[in-house]
Image: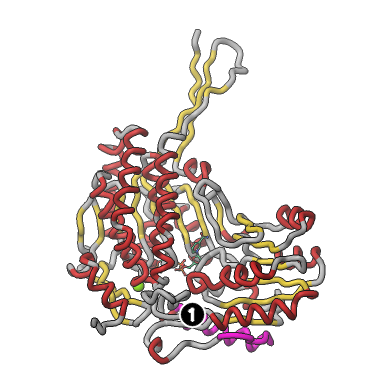
């Protein structure tokens, strides 16, 4: 019998982790940092070092952008849409073949239960397939002529060029595809800066892309710190577009840095999404739905429905069921098949979330479940029990600021009007949820809530073919759907005088 912890056993199966430090992936090759420096990355389930990553700085970013530019102007520009679509379908095959390894790496790196990362395979395959289809599906138009004389007016589209992509640690395997999918579908090239806490699946994917036949230099990865490699990428004068997923604070810096050459910017930022449970909701579905809408991925999901509004007439029953459900959730080793929630990504993130638990108590909210770091066998990892705050007011900090942990704030309301007003009283507008069987309520609320994505009697589903754009400080530019791809394209108009 093997007595090593399950995660360690999994780690030993991954050849990618056994062959030394992980360098940048530039021009299809592993390249160390020019400074020779590296940073550690940890397994959040154990607190132990998982790998050494190259510490990228301006000079490494410069090298990657220069390769991406040369590849964009050179061999990659000769690929036809059909060739890019075929390539993306080959990528789908290779991702499917290597998916178990990718899921294991992701779980080791950022702590999500392996069961969850394995289940995300369909989402990844659907997303990449969607981009394969999009490679054949963008085009200019011929404009009906209103000009005097014999004119033909047409628009043509062209890839914007070199795309910089900066992604967070909460779901890197899928997040990176919102950048590289758009780039590969349109003929752009990209330089990705993954989060320092979870860079491994981005690196391995880049390597697999080359194995699938994507030319070296099309997708490059520079690892390192946000304030160094990230900043250098967002400020680089030869990067044409920046696609950023992360916090609103960093999003602001990205906008400022983009001014240097007027980069096209797309931002997916933070949220404090409302999830509203009306008295006519089916509680069999609403209770687990609202709870997992917060706790999934240990609360590290931008669209988490962290403000749960419940109508007063069902409050007692809802709270009782919710607390009961929350206490029964199995938090534990990501590699244990019974685990529902793994650790938070890092010690720093755990401390940040715990500080909000303290703030909630100081503000007068009632802690009805969780709020504690888990000990025993889990003491070295960054585990927090699913946490419920009851008697929360929408103006408390725990209801206004993004916590990014498994912390649910329960707010009671009386009328639909009140629910709508409170739901929209937030600086964010990313997601929203409704639990009701009344079509009139549904209709008024779905039009009234100011958010990019609304789930009705469900939570958390995503279809790459459906676009969404955060309202307010949740970012701008469409993610998903045809408009997502449009963001990687210039449009120009040609006037032809036929006389
Ligand atoms: P973050 O601090 O903003 O980091 C995101 C990425 O930006 C990381 O790669 C980070 O590098 C980098 N970065 C940090 N400072 C930078 C700078 N000055 N210039 C350029 N890049 C910089 O966000 P996080 O706390 O890691 O991630 C959680 C946040 O992401 C939450 O706010 C969440 O809502 C948001 N998110 C949004 C979506 C969405 O679709 N709307 C999806 C997922 C997550 P380091 O890792 O080295 O710091
Ligand atoms: Mg890690």
The answer to whether residue 84 is left or right of residue 275 is: left
The residue lying toward the viewer, choosing from 156 and 81, is 81
The residue lying toward the viewer, choosing from 447 and 262, is 447
- Check the image and report above or below for 32 versus 97: below
Q: Is residue 62 visible?
A: no
Spot occupied by residue 470 in the image (x, y as percentages of width and height): 59, 56
How many marks on residues?
A: 1
Instruction: Assess whether residue 62 is covered by the magenta stretch.
Output: no
Instruction: Assess whether residue 354 is covered by the magenta stretch.
Output: yes
The answer to whether residue 204 is left or right of residue 493 is: left
Segment tinted magenta in the rendering: 349-370
Q: Which residue carries the number 1 mark?
A: 330
Q: Residue at x 59, y 20 (%)?
A: 144
Q: Is residue 10 visible?
A: yes
Q: Residue at x 52, y 79 (%)?
A: 329
Spot occupied by residue 282 in the image (x, y as percentages of width and height): 70, 66
């Amino acid at each position: 019998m093997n007595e090593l912890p399950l995660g360690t056993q999994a780690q030993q199966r991954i050849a990618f982790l056994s062959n030394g430090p992980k360098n940048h992936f530039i021009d299809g090759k592993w390249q160390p940092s020019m400074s020779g420096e590296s940073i550690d990355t940890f397994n959040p389930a154990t607190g132990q070092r998982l790998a050494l990553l190259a510490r990228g700085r301006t000079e490494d970013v410069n090298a990657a952008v220069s390769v991406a530019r040369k590849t964009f102007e050179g061999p990659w520009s000769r690929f036809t849409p059909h060739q890019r679509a075929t390539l993306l379908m080959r990528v789908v095959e290779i991702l499917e073949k290597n998916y178990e390894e990718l899921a294991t790496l992701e779980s080791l790196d950022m702590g999500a239960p392996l069961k969850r990362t394995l289940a995300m395979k369909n989402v990844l395959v659907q997303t990449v397939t969607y981009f394969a289809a999009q490679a054949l599906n963008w085009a200019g138009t011929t404009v009906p002529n209103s000009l005097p004389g014999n004119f033909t007016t047409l628009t043509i589209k062209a890839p914007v060029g070199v795309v910089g992509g900066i992604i967070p640690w909460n779901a890197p395997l899928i997040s990176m595809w919102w950048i590289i999918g758009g780039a590969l579908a349109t003929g752009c090239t990209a330089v990705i800066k993954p989060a320092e806490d979870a860079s491994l699946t981005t690196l391995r994917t880049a390597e697999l892309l080359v194995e699938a036949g994507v030319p070296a230099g099309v997708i490059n990865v520079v690892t390192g710190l946000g304030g160094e490699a990230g900043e250098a990428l967002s400020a680089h004068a030869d990067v044409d577009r920046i696609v950023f997923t992360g916090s609103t604070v960093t999003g602001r810096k990205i906008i400022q840095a983009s001014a240097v050459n007027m980069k096209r910017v797309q931002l997916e930022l933070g949220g404090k999404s409302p999830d509203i449970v009306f008295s006519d909701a089916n509680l069999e579905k609403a209770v687990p739905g609202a709870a997992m809408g917060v706790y999934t991925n240990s609360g590290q999901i931008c669209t988490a429905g962290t403000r749960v509004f419940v109508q007063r007439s069902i409050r007692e029953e809802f709270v009782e069921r919710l607390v009961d459900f929350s206490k029964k959730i199995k938090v534990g080793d990501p590699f244990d098949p019974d685990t529902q929630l793994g650790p938070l990504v890092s010690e720093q993130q755990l401390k940040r979330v715990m500080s909000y638990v303290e703030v909630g108590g100081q503000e007068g909210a009632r802690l009805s479940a969780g709020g504690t770091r888990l000990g025993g066998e889990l003491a070295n990892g960054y585990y927090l029990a699913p946490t419920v705050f009851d008697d929360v007011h929408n103006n408390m900090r725990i209801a206004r600021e993004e916590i990014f942990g498994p912390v649910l704030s329960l707010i009671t309301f009386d009328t639909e009007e009140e629910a709508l007003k409170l739901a929209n009283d937030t600086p964010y507008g990313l997601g929203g949820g409704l639990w009701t069987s009344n079509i009139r309520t549904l209709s008024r609320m779905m039009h009234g809530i100011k958010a990019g994505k609304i789930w009705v009697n469900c939570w958390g589903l995503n279809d790459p073919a459906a676009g969404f754009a955060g309202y307010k400080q949740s970012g701008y530019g469409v993610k998903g759907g045809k408009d997502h791809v449009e963001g990687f394209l210039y449009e120009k108009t040609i006037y032809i005088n036929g006389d």
